[in-house]
Image (cartoon, rainbow, N blue to C red):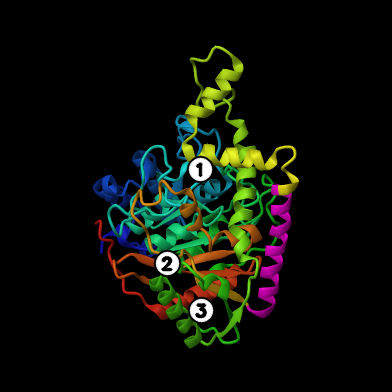
Amino acid sequence: MNPYELTIAQATGQMAAGSLSSREWTQSCLERIEAIDDKIKAFLVVKPEQALLQADAADIIRARGDAEPLCGVPLSLKDLLCTKGTVTTCGSRMLENFIPPYDATVVEKLKEQGAVILGKVAMDEFAMGSSSENCAFRVPENPWKPGFVSGGSSGGSAASVAASECPASLGSDTGGSIRQPASLCGIVGMKPTYGLVSRYGLVAFASSLDQIGPLTRDVTDCALMMNAISGHDPKDSTSVNRQIPDFCTSLTKGLQGLRIGVPQEYFGEGLHPEVRAVVTRGIAVLREAGAAIIEVSLPRTDYCVAVYYLIATAEASSNLARYDGVSYGFRNLESQALMEMYKETRSQGFGAEVKRRILIGTYALSAGYYDAYYKKASQVRSLIVDDFQQAFDQCDVLISPVVPTPAWKIGEKADNPLAMYLSDVLTISANLAGIPAMSVPGGYSQQGLPIGIQLQGAHFREDLLFKVAYNLEQGLNLQPQWPGII
């Protein structure tokens, strides 16, 4: 087995035994990127020299015998996480040459553990999209089928892990942007409870919805990554100060006494029959593991898309107002007057989807419309939170599809923004409610495309999600398959 094929748990075990070094593992991943990324198009920036220096430093630490769990682990980062000295574009021409002078807290945590940063990966511009087709530089492809989307907005993160260019990546999830690409690429992806992981240094899209989380090959690696990045951060005013458990202790077999809720609203019209079949099989596996399966209701599900696309665009309008060509980022140098410079900078620097969402959000916040749109959406959001609280009074974890369909062809939905928005219909509610949720590989379509299963839990019950996800993974026992692009 090539080192790049190893999971974090497998490789760190070998490093602890002395049969593998971080340099060997990192070099293997870099050679893998060199060999296949022209097809995958996951990476925007690769830092081979820096990565090998970090790997050598990790090997020295491991030789001393005081290594942290992620010491020497090569990772990729979604290109909206500020990384000191490395260009951070957010997939946008607006920040094409932006080099942050500091690290995001999660990046700082990884570096403190001795992790190796291979580079930055492609994404929808400012995380606005469901297919990564809105990236200004390159569109990552699904490793399982050439010409199909890898999902979004963390498409590069998912593709890099699924293609074995790295064992794990960090992405962000505002309305499903970790879970949806994880499902489409056949890997594990987690959106933590809002406030569990610091957002400091995450370039904001919608501040009340954004959350950073890991994408990995299996549930064990996901728990290791969550252990590393969780915790209170005084630099983030939304960070919650609470004790963080060791999530790896939840990875035990048996679900006796747990109640798994099946929200009927997630199994309605538009759900692809192959997706339904995969989730139904997942439910049966959890029942076999000892869980009680009960039906629950989330009656305001039909309002989630409308609420999300009012709140998210309104916050995006506010957050992206800073890109005016004055302080940093792209600036139109041909303008003769201030207002002209503002207009041309934003017209040329932002892509079509970002401009569409800024316009929607600005309208929703404008005088005379605020009460009718943004305020009302915020009120309905509170009702959606109530739905989940009532559901978790009846059950411990919810199970459902992640995406209504398997991956689709690149360009298939490019001219239909509404169809693209509806691909997030089953994931955005977790962001509105601030609850943890994850995607676990569930099976494959007849075309060989991966299909994920979504698990959602009550606030700060990641431990239960990991327990259920581990039993689901073990019970399904999917045989490892190589993506078709390789």
Residue 60 visible in the current orientation: no
Tell me the SS state at disc 1: loop
Residue under numbered circle 1: 80
Tell me which corner region of the image, top left, top right, bottom left or bottom right, holds residue 119: top left
Tell me the SS state at disc 3: loop
CA distance separating discs 2 and 3: 14 Å
Q: Which residues are magenta?
A: 373-395
Name the mark nearer the viewer: 2 or 3: 2
Image x and y of residue 288, in percent: 47, 87
Labels 1 & 2 near each other (Cβ < 8 A):
no
Check disc 1 and give the amino acid type: Leu
Check disc 3 and give the amino acid type: Thr
Instruction: Tell me the crowding category of disc 1: few under 14, some 14 to 19, or many 20 or more residues within 10 angstroms, Cα based.
Output: many
Check disc 2 and give the amino acid type: Asp
Tell me the SS state at disc 2: loop
Establish if 10 lies above or below 93: below
Residue under numbered circle 3: 252
Residue 384 visible in the current orientation: yes
Image x and y of residue 356, in percent: 53, 40
Give the mark nearer the N terminus: 3 vs 1.
1
CA distance separating discs 3 and 1: 34 Å
Q: Is residue 416 magenta?
A: no
Residue at x-position 51% and y-position 73%? 267
Residue under numbered circle 2: 218
Give the mark nearer the N terminus: 1 vs 2.
1
Establish if 400 lies above or below 294: above
Q: Nearer the viewer, residue 116 or 290?
A: 290
Image x and y of residue 12, in percent: 40, 62
Looking at the figure, which quarter contains the N terminus? Answer: bottom left
Q: Nearer the viewer, residue 51 or 391?
A: 391
